[in-house]
Amino acid sequence: MKRTIGRIALLLVISLLIGLVAGCDKPEETTTPVTTPTTTTAKPVETTTAGTEGNINPPGQLPVAKELDTLRVVISQSPHVLSYAYGENKFTTWLQDRTNVAVEHILYPEADATTKLNIELSTGGDLGDLILIQMDRAMLVTYGGQGVLLALNDLIEQYGYGMKECLDAYEGSIEAITAPDGNIYALPAGGLVGIFPNSYAMRYWIHTGFLNKYEAATGKGMPKTTQELQDYMQWCLDNDVNGNGQKDEVGWSGAEKTSVWYARPTCFLMNSFTLTNQDGYYQKDDVIHCAMVEEGYRNGLKYLNGLMEAGLMDKNYPSNDENALKTLVALEDGNTVASGSWGGMHNAATDHRIRNAYEIVAPLKGPDGFQNSFYDHYATGVTPGKATIPATSEKVDLAMAWMDTMYDQEVSFRGRYGEKGVDWEEPAAGVLAVDGGPAKYKDITNQWNVPTYSHWFTSSPAMWGRYGSMTSEPQPKTDKDGNPIHDLELSLYLAAREYEKYVIPCSIPNFFFDQETATKANEWKTNINDYCRSAITDFIFGNTDVNSDADWDAYVAQVKGLGLDEYLKVMQDNYDANWKGTLPKVYTPFPQRTE
Ligand SMILES: [Ca+2]
């Protein structure tokens, strides 16, 4: 604690100095109407527009500047980008021609951009007029609270047009971007409008060929319950479903590691026993719960332990990474694993033919009839974006007005795919996208992850990509050599539409804690997670007995000893203060996109 206070005191002195220097250095600056904050109070910064108003067009009107003006912008420098210069980089050129604002890039090497940004923020370095490097909530709270970053609340009100449209498009937008001190330190970044398949990623996949044989032999089809799933797995193992004369089939596979997308045994399968997110928490009736210490979760662990005892689960799952999973799934030409938990078929197979050999399983009913599909409500909508304005900015108004133009979809497409009509194009009217709505773009030259003059790679100032990859044209069935193509976007979109039918809203927000609480909450969360995941694996393998009340009670006591009640309380307090009513009681499926 002492060290923290010392550091804050030092930074306070530094920020005072910065304020004084900035104040003395620019006595005649006509384009700097901002009162540079010289204290660490968290009050929104007073701003006026006198002096620049004359050169800036009203919000929502292009170009931004009547006379060409220049913004100095901090971004991370990608090795993929061959030049950022006007006339050489197509995105730079387009942005300047469109806004009448030239950009002078202040480049932080991508590999340690955040480290460098922390140093510059802490020591009063050159931060330009605008920073376009994503900061996490802890950084925003820290540097915003110190006055190093401007509070943007009033500026959004004054200069917002596109950004207001974005904020208005989602419920809970303001809560999502407001720091605990009431200030907004990063401009809002908007998510997709409409369905976002990645928010329904606790998925389950089954081998279609095995399922067909099972149906032919038993008359039973696609499993609808956890018991039917177990029966299917058992049948595959007992009947040499891949026909190679060996008992080599695996009923279930997945991975404990979160680097494999939603592949834990407690992801999809636990949704038949309790509400839970991937971390083991959920919200119900405005109360935050830890599922991992509740009876529903325990019943799920009993089921998983039963699968393990019956020899139906991949025993290597605790150490599996994506490569190990893919290697297992690829055995016997893709005819070994009967079913499994993973977000998409790209996580389980490289070969598109094998990806196409599996199909999605709808949420299953558990022994008590419970059935849920986890949907991360807070993964959509608005988050604190990458754009922040340093207190030392000499052109706050221009930075705000320029950023307000970055909420257009075209900025997003150009920032991601490159030059319109050359690198990507708008499909002809009537062409339908993967999601059945009008196709919005077709990538032509693939300028991503390659040496390019087409964009700024991950440093695009685009703040609102409304249309995701499922708004592109669908893939053809086969490539030019006749090999099958797995249309990943189509697969994930259709899976999301299936899972939508079973969603019970239960996700918890991305809490914006003050610095001290954030540090404690992170410690509780990490300690609880480390212990629980290890204990869950022990229960599944039977190293500890999930059916024994003594073993279970000892586990719960241990979790509480790691600060569970305290952790739940800080989340609950924050929820009660800032988030009540942001989660709908009943899920409403997204309408078909028509525009
Ligand atoms: Ca076999």
Image (tube, rainbow, N blue to C red):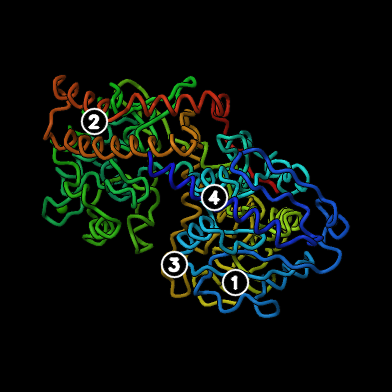
Residue at the spot x=28%, y=42% of the render? 216
Cα gap from disc 2 to disc 3, whole angstroms: 41 Å
Front-lying residue, 220 or 474: 474
State if disc 1 and disc 4 touch (CB < 8 Å).
no
Cα gap from disc 4 to disc 3, whole angstroms: 30 Å
The numbered mark, 2 or 4, whose residue comes first in the sequence reads 4
Dot 4 corresponds to which residue? 13
For discs 4 and 1, the disc positioned in front in the rendered view: 4
Dot 1 corresponds to which residue? 444
Tell me, for residue 111, which label it has, or none: 3
Which quarter of the picture shows residue 69?
bottom right
State if disc 3 and disc 4 touch (CB < 8 Å).
no
For discs 1 and 3, the disc positioned in front in the rendered view: 3
The image shows residue 183 at horizontal and vertical percentages of 62, 39
Cα gap from disc 4 to disc 1, whole angstroms: 53 Å
For discs 2 and 3, the disc positioned in front in the rendered view: 3
Residue at the spot x=16%, y=44% of the render? 237
User: Is residue 273 visible from the viewing direction of this image?
Assistant: no
Q: Is residue 103 above or below residue 521?
A: below
Cα gap from disc 1 to disc 3, whole angstroms: 29 Å
Tell me, for residue 301, which label it has, or none: 2
Residue type at tag 4: Val
Residue type at tag 1: Ile
Residue at the spot x=56%, y=28% of the render? 578
Cα gap from disc 2 to disc 4, whole angstroms: 54 Å
The image shows residue 148 at horizontal and vertical percentages of 59, 50
The numbered mark, 1 or 3, whose residue comes first in the sequence reads 3
The numbered mark, 4 or 1, whose residue comes first in the sequence reads 4
The numbered mark, 2 or 3, whose residue comes first in the sequence reads 3
